[in-house]
Amino acid sequence: MKSILFCSVLACLALALANVPAPAQTPAQRWQMQYFYDQAKTNLVFLDFQFVSPTRGIAIGDIVDGKGRKGVSIVTQDAGAHWQLVPVEENPVSIFFLNDSLGWMVTEKGLWQTNEGGKDWHKLPRLPAQPIHVFFTDENTGWAAGTKKSVFVTHDGGRKWEPVAAAAEPSGVPERSAYTWIAFANANYGIITGLNQPVQRWAQMFPTWLDPEDALTRRETAHMAYALVTNDGGKTWKTESASLIGRITRVRLGAAGFGLGLIEYADSFKFPSEAYKIDWKTGKNTTIFRDKRYGISDVWLTPGGTAYLAGVEFPGEVRSVSPGKVKVFQSTDFTSWTEQPVDYRATAQRVLLAGSGEDLWMATDNGMILKWK
């Protein structure tokens, strides 16, 4: 009798538990698609990407068809839930936004400014040399890195520019030299990187996709890499140069004293890319990631110190021919890397990262934008 009663109690308890709703499971984070340009006979190639707040973001690129290219930007005001496509008059190269409304856009023919968050642009006076990248520390003070081994500074928001004399000091013919990237860690410390590209030993007779075997045998030659460094907010610049294989394509600096850099290599090199940690207080660099399987095309460092690497897994030996699966890696110690889950539809040849605070987005060169959530 006692055992029967005990079993009856257990049965009732089991039945009661069966009717209690299970605790809600928190969905695992992953890179989820927010936008995809899907138009017949045209492609959207994103070229630059920036989020200036957790809700306001802008990407620029070209819509490409069989006849040519048309410049566009797409803008969001609600953290990527909705995007508005905005045509621009000239093909864009890069952008820089200081806040939600004030920004600058480098195009193939000059420099433009917006006071309306990218919804409307007006052209600024032409610089002495073609700019590639700009960076502003306030609404008036900014720098432009450009072709012909030139860097310029403005103190009126981009209406007038003066040359930075230190940029011309490194060796190398100006016609084959350029500064391509600008990064500041704080109001005082900044770096501008560039390169001198020598005449190649063998001219590239055919596109890589037409003769992939030639691309694999075409050895990459060393070139001069340039760096201008300031510790006083751009009042003075120290020049540095060194022989380097590969091209420095990204520098992201954090306020805590370190940052991330990225070098990308040609198809014939054994590694597609190499990410390194920058200790900008001591000037020491340490390699933190390189893998034959993955071509990293952007790096990111959050204010909290989390590092992200984004790129693609190449399907074949010739890396620049066809798109591969998008891959993103995360680390908090710059040593161990965790691969993050990405929407299975995300394929590309190059990807871009943009963030605000700890929020992060990614754009591909085939018209897709994803968010880590």
Image (tube, rainbow, N blue to C red):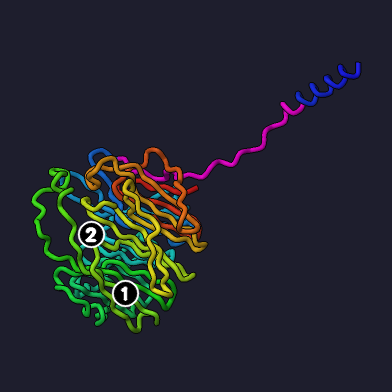
Could you tell whether 46 is left or right of 203 in the image?
right
Residue occupying the point 9% across, 56% down: 203
Q: What is the C-alpha distance between the residues marked 2 and 1?
A: 21 Å
Q: Which mark is residue 121?
A: none
Q: Is residue 354 above or below residue 187?
A: above
Magenta stretch encompasses residue 19? yes
Identify the amino acid type marked 1: Trp
> Which label sits in the foreground, 2 or 1?
1
Mark 2 — residue? 90
The residue closer to the viewer here, 163 or 334, is 334
Magenta stretch encompasses residue 141? no
* Local secondary structure at mark 2: loop
Residue 273: x and y in percent read 31, 55
Identify the amino acid type marked 2: Glu
* Disc 1 residue crowd, few under 14, some 14–19, many 20+, Cα 10 Å: many
Residue 267: x and y in percent read 22, 50
Residue occupying the point 41% across, 72% down: 280
Mark 1 — residue? 143
Could you tell whether 177 is left or right of 31 in the image?
left
Q: Which residues are magenta?
A: 16-38
Q: Can residue 75 be seen in the rendering of this structure?
A: yes
